[in-house]
Amino acid sequence: MADDAHMVIVGAGLAGARASAELREAGFAGRVTLITNEPHEPYDRPPLSKAVLLGEKSPGDCALFADTFFHDHAIDLMRSTEVVEIDREGRAVLLANGERIGYSRLLLATGASPRTLNTPGSTLPGVMTLRTADDARYLAARLRDGQHIAIVGGGFIGLEVAASAVATGCRVTVIEAGERLLMRAVPREIAARIEARHRDAGVQFRFGAQLAAIAGDSAAEEIRLADGEIIRCDTVVVGIGAAPRTALAQAAGIEVADGIVVNERLCTSDPAIFAAGDVCSFPHPLYGRRVRLECWKNADGQGRIAARNMLGEDLAYGDMPWFWSDQYELSIQIAGLPAFSRATVVRETADALLLFHLSADGTLIAASGVGRAVGRDIRIAQMLMARNARISAEELADPSVKLKSLLIAEAV
């Protein structure tokens, strides 16, 4: 790519920020502009629901790069800036202030927005989502001893907030419309272990619950369920998933279907425009289908690959999906996508519950676990998956058979 080229990145979450750094790492000497609608420098989101809420870190401690990084690398970081339109024919983006910025290549890393409630009272003060550093700062100030925190949604964000809130002395009630926690995220056995740990910590649950209204004189004071139950509370945290931010792409005529549609190189239907991170839907070679992933590893890897391909390389993205969550002393890790498996093998150890998920022909395609120490076993499972390993169910289930020995056997 010529030195007079201009790379523009919309969105400064992990994918966008990582892409800007990768452009310089790859030796690109032209202009790089990174645009974010937030007032902060790019930061890491996972600590927001844990270390920040617990007071162990400030939002500023979560910065992805050193204070002088963007200056030192000649990356033009435009904060508190909204992109309102993409002019594909003119290869430019239009800002809310009327400014027009031309691009040689454009990366859309606009991420996802938390879904909100549409029930009566859902806009009252004290009803919030947790996505940004400002959200975390606001919620952290409300987590005080004796406060009652109602959490709508039993997904990862809601449960991480629950664990942090309990640790600060709050009472917590989780309200979930489904029959169990983490319906789309983890297998039932893993969810049951997580629920049991939360119950041990004092968290209350309402499953199969529908909200009728949130009420209060000047702020949220209670949640009214459809069955008539009233749950008094001081704060309502809504964690019911997120939707990809595709409006810009859609308005510009770029193909969208559960996210911005990209090919294996992360290029959209416009050859000058790429997309990466939570916002994009891409073909995954391991599963033979299109997926959209909301996880740290995916955003990090796609940011790097998109940057290289914007410079003219021809790299396909196909990293193994990997998710994690820390709640209390437990680590939850998922490698691959268990939902696409046909059979599951259970392995129980003193420290963890591990599940190995197999395809119809017995190939290991995913692994999930919960416990005090699951990281090592999940990493080995990832290496086995990379080799398309077929291992007997008996060996996978037997805790006396070391996973490392299976890896060594596969290598022979």
Image (cartoon, rainbow, N blue to C red):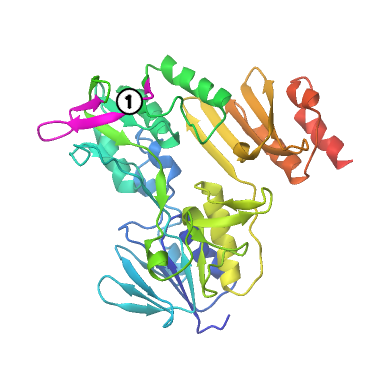
Picture quadrant where residue 408 is located: top right
Residue at the image point whose x is 58% and y is 80% from the top: 1
x and y percent of residue 164 in the render?
A: 38, 29
Amino acid carrying mark 1 in the image: Thr
As rendered, which of 255 and 265 lies closer to the eye?
Answer: 255
| Location of residue 236 with respect to 31 vertically, above or below | above
x and y percent of residue 378 in the render?
A: 66, 35
Is residue 335 in sight in this rendering? yes
Residue at the image point whose x is 74% and y is 23% from the top: 397
Is residue 243 shown in magenta?
no
- Residue indicated by mark 1: 168
| Magenta span | 206-225
Dot 1 falls on a residue whose secondary structure is loop
Quadrant where the image shows the C terminus: top right
Is residue 208 shown in magenta?
yes
Residue at the image point whose x is 56% and y is 72% from the top: 310
